[in-house]
Structures are given as structure tokens and as C-alpha cells.
Image: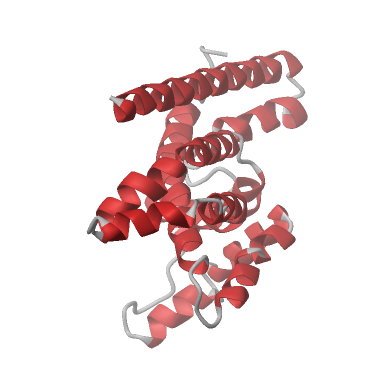
Amino acid sequence: MFKTYYFLGSLRSTAIFAAMSIPTIVFASLGIALLITRRFRGAGFLQWLVLIPWAIPLVVSGTIWKWIFDSAYGVFNDILYRLGLISEYVPWVTLPIPAMLILLLAFTWVMLPMPTLLFMAGIQSIPQELYEAAWVDGAKAFSTFKSITFTWLRPIMLINVIYTTLMAIWSFDLIYTITQGGPADFTALISFYTYHEMFTFLDFGKASALSIFVLIIGIILIYAYFKALRIGALRLRA
């Protein structure tokens, strides 16, 4: 497995994708949860809107995003062309950085519902007496968020980070439907090569080795997350 030509490249692509997607999804879902848990007109509609990606199969979502950025009839190219920002349609999926960003956008879209719902549940479980006491003491909005909201949501944030990490390193459906691992294997994550080793080349031994390797990486990351949360909690108490 370590001697195969694609191993290091796929590992690098997986690390880049995970490093971009994990903070993007966690903080975006936290921001959305903070927004839609406020009482204002249209909050119920936004809560329903957040769940739409959950109702669409991953393959269908990937196909939709591929059509949006299609080089011949994609709506993204059409908008840029009408605005005069480009003189001709651009094949975004065939360019390394844009292709990775398109995957990031599609992955964020399909992964947002679960972390957002968990954050919403956590926010709604915070006792309002804590906020009232902070307001009486004259605490500012950022201090209140840091001392109460963020502290209360730390365990939920850990769950969301673990969930997003595992989904990121094993993401396959969107890659298969949008980029097929291209261009030049730039978006070929390690899960994509595991699939090809298993079902294209029928090398079950190498595919099993790749699966076990990713499993070990996932366990190490989960342990590191729990360790970081425990250390942060101890420092907070001190």
C-alpha cells in the first residue's frame, strides 16, 4: 500500500479536503443555528430550508452541483458571463483549485443539516437564567457568547467535529459524480482509490489495507479531539 504511486497524493488530497471542510462546516452550522434559533419572522421557514439537503440523495446532490458548474451549460458560468466577468465559459471542474472548492461547496451543502440540528438542540437547552445573570452583570455580547454559549456547546462541537471528520475522510459519492478524482488526481481522496482497488482492479488485499489505514487515522483523530476537549475543559475550570 505504501509503495503505490497514488498513496501519498491521495493522502495529501484527503488532508487538504478535511482541513478545509471541517472548520467550514462546523462554524457555518454554528452560525446558522445561532441565527435560526432567534425569534423572528421566517425562522420556521429557515429551519425547514436547512433540512432540504438531507432529503436529497448524495448522488443526486453531486449531479446537481456538477450541472451548476458545467462548462457548456452551467448556471454559474452563465451568471458570470452575463455579468461580464468572463468572456467564455470556463471548465471549472477540470481546474485543480476550483474543482476542490466545488467539492468543498457540495460537501458543505450536504453535511450542514446534522451539525446544525445538534447545535440548535444545544442552544435551546441553555438555561436563560445564565444570560439574564450576564446581562445584569453588564457583560457584552461577545463575552456572553464566549463564556456561556460556546462553553455550553463544547461537547456538541466535539461531536460535530468527529462526525464531519469521519465523513470528510470517507467522502466518495460527491467525488465520483462531480470530478471522478480529477483533474490529475487532485481531488482523488483515499476513499476514491479504495473503491477503485476494490471494484475496478479487484485487489481486495490493498483495498482492505487502505480501509484499515483510514480506520486507524480516524481513531487517532477522535482520541486527539477528546484529549483536546478535556485539556480545554481543565484550563477553563482553572
Where residue 97 sits in the image (x, y, percent)? Answer: 38, 50
Residue closest to the eye, 163 or 7: 163
Residue 160 vertical position relative to residue 207 in the rendered view, above or below: below
The N terminus sits in image quarter = top right
Residue 161 point in image, percent of width and height: 50, 38
- Please say which color scheme the image uses: secondary structure
Q: 223 or 171: which is nearer to us?
A: 223
Q: Quadrant of residue 207?
A: top right
Asked if residue 11 lies left or right of residue 219, the reply is left
x 43%, y 32%: residue: 15
State the count of labels. Answer: 0
- Expressed as whole percent of the image width and height from the top left, the position of residue 87 reads 34, 79
Q: Is residue 164 left or right of residue 129?
A: right
The one of 1 and 15 positioned closer to us in this rendering:
15
Instruction: Name the foreground residue: 100 vs 155.
Output: 155
Position above or below: 206 against 122: above
